[in-house]
Image (spheres, helix red, strand yellow):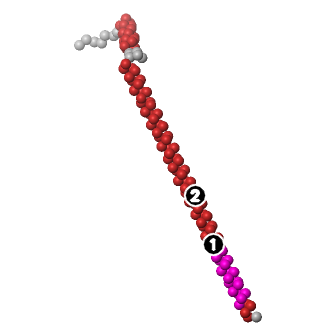
Amino acid sequence: MSGFKEPNFSDRQKAAQQARQNILEKFRSRPGPDDPAVQARAAERAAIAAAREQARLAREAAKAEQKRLEEEAAAAEAARIAREKEEEAARHAALEAEQKAKRDARYAARKERGKKKK
C-alpha cells in the first residue's frame, strides 16, 4: 500500500486549470435561445403562467360573486327587519287605537250613567 502523495504546486495549477476548462465546456455546451428544447421549455413556462393567471382570475370572479351574494342576502335581511319593524309599529298603533276606543267607550258609558241618575 503506497502512502498519500501530496500534490505539488504544478499539480494544483493543472487541477485548477482543468476545473476552469470543465466549467467553460459546460457553459459552451448549453443550448442557445434558438434551440427547440429551450423554446419548448419557455413555451411550457408561459403556458403554466397563463394557466395560473386564469385560475387567479377565476378565484377573483368567484370571490366577487360570493361578495355580491352576501350583499344581496344582507340587503334582504335589512329589508326583512325594516318590514318587521313597520309591522310592529302598525300593530302597536292599532293596539293603541283599540285601547283608546275602549277607554272612550268606558268614559262615554260612565257619562251616560251619570246623565240617567240625574
Q: Quadrant of residue 6?
A: top left
Q: Nearer the viewer, residue 72 or 35?
A: 72
Q: Is residue 41 left or right of residue 62?
A: left
Q: Are marks 2 and 1 in contact (CB under 8 Å)?
A: no
Which element is circle 2 on?
A: helix
The part of the chain drawn in magenta is 97-113
Q: Earlier in the sequence, mark 2 or mark 1?
A: 2
The residue positioned 73% from the left and 90% from the top of the image is 114
Residue 13 horizontal/vertical position (percent): 39, 7
Q: Does residue 15 lie above or below 116 as drawn?
A: above
Residue 28 makes an appearance in the image? yes
Q: Which quadrant holds the C terminus?
A: bottom right
* Three-letter residue code for mark 1: Ala
> Residue 51 bears which disc, if any?
none
Task: Find out whether residue 102 is within the magenta segment.
Answer: yes
Q: Nearer the viewer, residue 22 or 64?
A: 64
- Seen as rendered, the residue at the extreme left is 1
The residue positioned 59% from the left and 66% from the top of the image is 87
Q: Quadrant of residue 116?
A: bottom right
The residue positioned 28% from the left and 12% from the top of the image is 3
So how many labels did they put on this image? 2
Residue 23 makes an appearance in the image? no
Task: Find out whether residue 72 is within the magenta segment.
Answer: no
> Residue 94 bears which disc, if any?
1
Q: Look at mark 2 in the image and give the residue it sits on.
A: 79
* Three-letter residue code for mark 2: Ala
